[in-house]
Amino acid sequence: MTPRLTPLALSVVSLAASGLVLAIFTGRPELIVAVVPLVFGLFRRRFLASSDWQIARGLSADQAFEGEHVVVTITVSAEGNVPTLELFEPLPPSLRLVAGSNRGFFTLTRDQSVKWTYEVECRRRGRASLGVVHARLWDRAGLHAVESAARASGPLRVYPRRIQLRRLPRPRRTQTSVGNYVASSVGQGIEPGDIREFAPGDRIRHVNWRASLRFRKLFVTQYHQERNADVILMLDTLSEAGAAPETTLDASVRAAASLAGAYLARKDRVGLIEYGGPFRWVRPGSGRGQRERLLEALLRAEVVFSYVRGDVGLVPRRVLPPQALVIAISPLVDPHFEKAVVDLAARGFDLVILSPSPIPLVRRTMPASPSVDLACRLWALERRARAASLQRLGLRVLEWDPRQPLELALAVFNPVRRRMMG
Amino acid sequence: MWLPPLVLTVAVLGYPLLVAPARGVLVIGLAALVLCALGLVVRSGALVTAGGVLALGQYALALWLAAAPPRLAGAVLFGVGLVLLVETADFSRRVRGATLGPGLVASQVRYWVGFAGLAGAAALVAAGLATAASAVVRLPWAPAFAAGGAVAALVAVTIALRRRQIP
């Protein structure tokens, strides 16, 4: 690495030249003498070694949720004397500096090490790569510098922010495994369903004594079975609107992560289909492992343009079970996704569309003006007309303003569904 | 870190007023002060350099107006002050908003103190050599030497500009 001159060196040379020119014009020796310290500084060039120091990075957590803070600690150590070392770590857009500075200046003596910490806020889901630290080694005067870079691995996975959900869209059909939904069929459970006459083999603790005394015969209480359900989250990654980190895809991913967590807590099997350029899916499953798999899949969810459009008919049955509740999460901007959803509904799937509205997200990125207001009103009318046309096909569209709690949008679902079923 | 360069600015611009307390010197000094202060605020090395050039002009005007015998000790102090002014201004510009490691400022101050001593001594030695040389070299040649030095400095500027620089 060759030391290079800095702008300060040019400043010093300019001052020296000015002093000399003025000395000639005025004929005063003091100006020549005043220039000597300037020239003296230029000739004090020192050798700058770029390999006398090392860095190591540590993170307070290698996994975090959106909005959480992570402390980055960088340890700088030197094998020789380092006059002035400037380190700069560029932050990816998904991270925001909240405390300290991602630029630091250090002076190190032989075998000395110093710790440098700063705190970042995780703004957007994804894999944040804190990899390269840019370094500039200055001489004491600041006239010469050497630039280099050091790699220190620091992978940080930022998961989508989870929203606590108490009410969830209830599946119309249940599966055979034990879960939290009261099924119409009778069997083992705790929810009383019906009574019938005692038959040999019935357990004594199921005898309904009140009915038995009234009818002078033994009756037993039958209980509804408690079953789980299959829930498939279908994420629209064909398009997005708004500015990061508040795009419709970000809102959709947060909603998907929240729904997945809530359904998995109810012992349901949850799967994911990413409907976009590359057609990706996660097979339905349950438990903590499935939660990790879903969050990992949601980390990589992004809009990738492609001329190829996936056909939901090609999705294997084990990924999209026929009895599953499909929750399609889409801003309904791309007509291809609507077509896929209508196709699924036509094949008899229990289907709900959760639509994060792109209008408030786009509006906040634009300066307020009457024409923007008018455009947004027209857009809202168009979305309403589109939702009405989907409802005419028997689909329920839940409009969600991403600035509002998700639970508010889901709350209207179950009463409507009961009315539809009734 | 803005205080040391500001103090040095006031000191460097105040010295010519001691040499010749004239209105013209004051006006140029004020203009230089504004440029240096602006350079410190907006973190511009070019503005501080322009202020330094004006300070040299102010000093030249003061010397010309005073028409006194040469005061080499004052010139050495002025030169050292000017170098420290641009170096401290550049240092404060570089470290603004950054985390400073332990002992960085103290070691930098130690360097500047040592540099001031060495540069001052070098200037005095150079002045002594020049005085001794003046006995040998005829007086009419002195402007030619100065012109040669100025040309050399300008060539150095050209070479510095041609080399790739660090922003």
Image (cartoon, coloured by chain):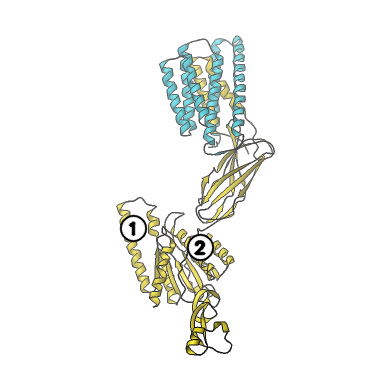
Chain colours: A yellow, B cyan
Quarter of the image holding residue A294? bottom right
Chain containing mark 1: A
What residue do we see at 48% from left, 62% from top? A164
The numbered mark at residue A151 is none
What residue do we see at 59% from left, 23% from top? B116
Q: Nearer the viewer, mark 2 or mark 1?
A: 2
Instruction: Mark 2: give few (<14), some (14-19) or many (20+) Cα within 10 Å.
Output: many
What residue do we see at 62% from left, 22% from top? B118
Where is the C terminus of chain A found, in terms of image quarters?
A: bottom left
- Report the front residue among A1 and B41: B41
Residue A172 in the image, given as x and y percentages of width and height: 46, 75
Residue A99 in the image, given as x and y percentages of width and height: 53, 44
Element type at mark 1: helix
Instruction: Mark 1: give few (<14), some (14-19) or many (20+) Cα within 10 Å.
Output: some
Amino acid on which disc 2 is placed? Ala
Element type at mark 2: helix
Q: CA distance from mark 2 to mark 1?
A: 29 Å
Give the mark, 2 or 1, whose residue is nearer the N terminus: 2
Taking A38 as reference, is B128 above or below it? above
**Residue beneath disc 2:** A257
What residue do we see at 55% from left, 27% from top? B156
**Residue beneath disc 1:** A376
Where is the N terminus of chain A found, in terms of image quarters?
A: top right
Residue A133 in the image, given as x and y percentages of width and height: 59, 45
- Asked whether the viewer can see residue A109, the reply is yes
Residue A5 in the image, given as x and y percentages of width and height: 57, 33
- Asked whether the viewer can see residue A304, the reply is no
Amino acid on which disc 1 is placed? Cys
Chain containing mark 2: A
